[in-house]
Amino acid sequence: MTGSLSIFLPDGDSPNTDSLNTLAATITSTASANLDVSVVVPTFREVENLTTLTEQLFAALHERSLTGELIVVDDNSCDGTIELCQRLAETYPIRLVVRTEERGLATAVIRGFSEASGTYVVVMDADLSHPPTAVPTLLETLQTNQADFVIGSRYVKGGTIDESWSIFRRINSRVAGFLATGLTSAKDPMAGFFAIRRSQLGDVTRLNPCGYKIGLETIVRCECKSVAEVPIHFEDRQFGESKLNLKEQWLYVRHLLRLYAFRYPEACRFMTFGAVGLSGMIVDLVTFSSLTPSLGLSAARAAAIWVAMTWNFELNRRVTFKTSAKSSIAAAYVRFCTACLTGAALSWGTFVGLTSLSESFRNQPVATAVVGTFAAAIVNYVLCRSWVFVTGKPQQLEAAPVAVTPDILTLDKEERPAQPPTRIAA
Ligand code: GDD
Ligand code: MN
């Protein structure tokens, strides 16, 4: 198997290193037709691992008569990755994308997706944690199980993890996986080793990860209905360091919220509406207690209800029912107040109705009031949804998709942390 190195460098006019500059002149095209698989590998300082990975990967593909290309997406490691890829490309079909403006595992993988030309796309780490020998098995499973997505999994029968994993890392990994149960039934949704049909990826600009869980992002956004898992042994890296740090935990929580909002927009909107309502209750109580000394009980109560209602209107307008519709805010405010009055009347009516109906409701006034409040919340929500905030569009809790833009050759402004980050990967 031979190939030529195709280095994707931007057309920028200010190359950041001599080496990039020299190599930019040697770009060759390797647009290969009818490839079975494009293997996307994000790298940052993986020069010690790339040779073994490449050799093992192409040996595994060759054994099953599969044709493939390796797409290395490197974030300007400056560790000799470019020169190494150039040497390896004398023997293997490798394409190298060097990104200098953007950084991060997930966006690197998306960039790799957009470069891929194979029928199938596999994503794996460079550090040999994911066994290259398993790649053909992942592809076979895609075909034979008619799955949309296949994971190289640590947590199905036969799958194992490196013995050196601390109890903290094990628990962390399991909890992170558990939090994703509403999004996928996969046992190892955190995995960075997976295969998918390129046609299933569709338009990759709709992928919008925050953090590094690109597999989970792909399952959800590419609407992979059937996810299969192939057991693998996850070996800890021998060379180099993990690049993932504690910040990723927080990013993962934000990522999950986005994905749940994407998958269950209506439930999310209702929960946001509920949260706004609760915050309004706090505003109501704080305003009431602070105004009572100056206004007296009755006037303070009225003022507090009005302040809380206005608070709820503003939050619902800006967050819950964020909309592109251009209707007058004043008119929406009047409609909102009307909806609140309707809700309040219903709440009161339910309470009076139930307590006059039966002795058991009269004995439980607080619980009965809660029933009324809940009924009012639902009616209020329906009115807001269909009348007050004429939305037309589902809630958008997230930022615009990450655009895969061409890189520009400039020196990176941010430095990588000098200290090895805490190892927390799930
Ligand atoms: N281009 C690019 N840019 N690649 C990166 C970056 C980056 O900023 N950060 C990490 N990578 C590459 C690494 O070079 C490696 O090939 C791969 O992404 C995984 O990074 P590691 O640093 O080895 O991550 P890990 O071992 O802690 O986590 C892995 O295992 C997890 C499961 O335990 C990853 O595969 C995760 O996706 C996976 O969830
Ligand atoms: Mn690793």
Image (cartoon, helix red, strand yellow):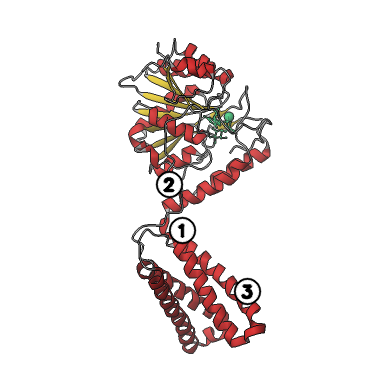
- What is the x, y in percent for residue 17? 54, 20
For label 3, the residue is: 286
Estimate the spatial distance between the alpha carbons at disc 3 and disc 2, rounded to whole Å: 37 Å
- Residue at 39% x, 33% y: name it: 196
**Res 259 seen here:** yes
For label 1, the residue is: 268
Badge 1 density bin: few <14, some 14–19, many ≥20, Cα 10 Å:
some
Mark 1 vs mark 2: in front: 2
Disc 2 marks a residue whose amino acid type is Ala
Disc 1 marks a residue whose amino acid type is Cys
- What is the x, y in percent for residue 109? 46, 32
Disc 3 marks a residue whose amino acid type is Val
Vertical placement of 353 versus 392: above or below?
below
- Establish whether ligand 1 lies closer than 8 Å to the Cβ of label 1: no
- Residue at 65% x, 35% y: name it: 423
- Establish whether ligand 1 lies closer than 8 Å to the Cβ of label 3: no
